[in-house]
Image (cartoon, rainbow, N blue to C red):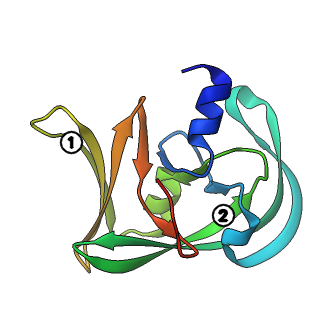
């Protein structure tokens, strides 16, 4: 996929990112709490990226036919990044009762599984092009 095509493909998606140290979102409308900030953070290859806000995002997805809520805390608002990046390290740091595992199905499709130990809720992300994509609802809008 060409760079421009890849950026367009990733726009509006939720990606489980094991290298990202913070949750990042480019969509201001997704925040249920928000505080203005102005900080530089390290981007890919240590290229600085400007975060102009911080807050919580409420994410909804369907699990076994039920609408389930997940709150991402301390998400940085970075208007020009394309996809929302969900930090594996932030999930594990904040939620000690959560486990993340990766598996390959018999069909060869790799998935990431986030499991809540107390509620036994599973969120899955399927691999495509080397990235793990969530199929969530954010603010009532279905994301692919």
Q: Is residue 55 visible?
A: no
Q: CA distance from mark 2 to mark 1?
A: 27 Å
Q: Tell me where residue 76 appears, x and y as whole percent.
A: 72, 59
Q: Which residue is mark 1?
A: 103
Helix, strand or loop for disc 1: strand
2 or 1: tag closer to the N-terminus:
2
- Give the total number of marks visible in the rendering: 2
Q: Tell me where residue 91 appears, x and y as whole percent.
A: 47, 61
Q: Which residue is mark 2?
A: 75
Q: Tell me where residue 20 appears, x and y as whole percent.
A: 58, 44
CB under 8 Å between discs 2 and 1:
no
**Where, by quadrant of the figure, is residue 105 drawn?**
top left
Query: Which quarter of the figure is the N terminus placed in?
Result: top right
| Residue at x 87% of width, y 64% of height | 37
Helix, strand or loop for disc 2: strand
**Where, by quadrant of the figure, is residue 57 drawn?**
bottom right
């Amino acid at each position: 996929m060409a760079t421009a095509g890849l950026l367009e493909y990733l726009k509006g998606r939720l990606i489980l990112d094991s290298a990202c140290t913070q949750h990042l979102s480019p969509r201001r409308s997704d925040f249920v709490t928000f505080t203005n900030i102005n900080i530089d953070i390290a981007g890919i290859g240590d290229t600085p990226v400007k975060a102009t806000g911080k807050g919580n995002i409420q994410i909804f997805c369907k699990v076994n036919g039920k609408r389930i809520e997940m709150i991402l805390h301390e998400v940085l608002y970075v208007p020009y990044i394309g996809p929302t990046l969900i930090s594996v390290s932030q999930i594990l740091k904040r939620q000690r009762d959560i486990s993340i595992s990766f598996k390959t199905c018999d069909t060869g499709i790799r998935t990431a599984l986030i499991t809540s130990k107390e509620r036994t809720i599973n969120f899955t992300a399927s691999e495509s092009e080397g990235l793990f994509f969530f199929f969530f609802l954010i603010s009532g809008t279905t994301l692919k």
